[in-house]
Amino acid sequence: MRWHVAHSVRGRLRVRYPAGWLKPRQDAVVSTLRSVPGVRTVDGSGLTGSVRIEYDPFRLAESALVDVLGQIDSGLDVGGRETAMGIEPAARLDASSTPLVRLAGATTVLALAATEVVSWPLLTVLLLAADGPALLRAGAALARGRVNGEVLEASTLAVLAARRNFPAAALLTWLRALGDWVVSRSVVTTRRSLRDLIVAADETAVRRDGDGRTTVPAAALQAGDIVIVRAPRRLPVDGTILSGEALVNQQTMTGESLPVERTAGDTVFAGTTVENGELEIRVDRAGLDTAVGRIVAIVESPSSSPITGWPRASAFPPRS
């Protein structure tokens, strides 16, 4: 592998190649990366061997992007021409896959405990394995001097196992695994709905290109583009109205039930809906950079990074 990851944050990845290798292949690398669904911008430098990739983490996992880089690396010949076509990123794993595996394991342990076909030492080991993540969290809580629900459940499990009441212990483990799976499914559904507030996977927009109009994927819009939105249509971007007049339903942003009138010079926001009229809008922000995108990013990853501040009030549309 000729490249390595030099810098990585959510939504942005910088990789470095040997400058001599990248220089004749820069155009092929950049164009291939730009064609990957979910990649927003790609900038490369043949002098430094650096390639900076900005992508939508809601549509493309970093691990899938790394897989694509590996395919590009092996798919370019000496002349810099792409020999491996049809590169597709690996699908992101469903967030509920791990809880589902744990539920399957807990179900197996419950069946073994109910039928008593294995010895009690083996059942003890299986119980610990099936409830391992929860036991680790309980241990971490105790190490911090805290007693929470997981500590109490772990204590109950330990007492039941010590008394060799394995059916009850297995049932407790199964109920916990079932609850985790149900919660994970709810989280997946909620996050998918939140991502659709920014831009649905199949959503399109009408972009003005010179004197003509072109229908493009809404995810491909960038700051500076001119889009035409005609009722009834949801706005895919934050932008400034250049011409036109329309009634815009801003309930998703402000909660108000009645649409408000918007004309040239006004600011409109992604996730709101044009209910009547037609607008020509200059794109100011798209994707995760929109006001609703920043809100979704905060909701999407509350446990992965601390919230250092809320969006400023100026990021939200006026109520009238």
Image: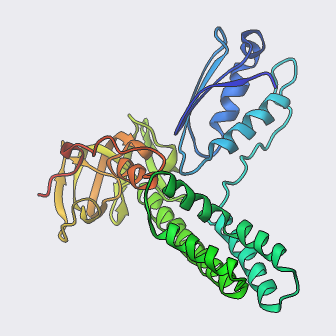
Residue 258's spot in the image, x, y percent?
17, 70
Residue 106's spot in the image, x, y percent?
71, 76
Q: Residue furthest front?
A: 163
Residue shown at the point (57%, 77%) measured from the top left: 156
Residue shown at the point (61%, 47%) measured from the top left: 60
Which of the two residues, 95 or 120, is positioned nearer the viewer here?
120
Compared with residue 45, is residue 172 higher up or lower down, i.e. above or below? below
Q: Is residue 156 visible to the viewer in this orientation of the structure?
A: yes
Compared with residue 39, is residue 273 higher up or lower down, i.e. above or below? below
Compared with residue 88, is residue 159 higher up or lower down, i.e. above or below? below
Compared with residue 45, is residue 58 higher up or lower down, i.e. above or below? below
- The C terminus: image quadrant: bottom left
Coloring scheme used: rainbow
Residue 142's spot in the image, x, y percent?
50, 57
Residue shown at the point (39%, 44%) measured from the top left: 306
- The N terminus: image quadrant: top right
All told, the count of numbered labels is 0
Q: Residue furthest left?
A: 320
Taking the image as shown, residue 236 lies to the left or right of residue 41, namely left
Residue shown at the point (78%, 80%) measured from the top left: 108
Which of the two residues, 106 or 196, is positioned nearer the viewer here?
106
Residue 161's spot in the image, x, y percent?
69, 78
Which of the two residues, 118 or 308, is positioned nearer the viewer here?
118
Q: Is residue 95 visible to the viewer in this orientation of the structure?
A: no
Taking the image as shown, residue 111 lies to the left or right of residue 283, namely right
Which of the two residues, 41 or 58, is positioned nearer the viewer here?
58
Taking the image as shown, residue 170 lies to the left or right of residue 277, namely right
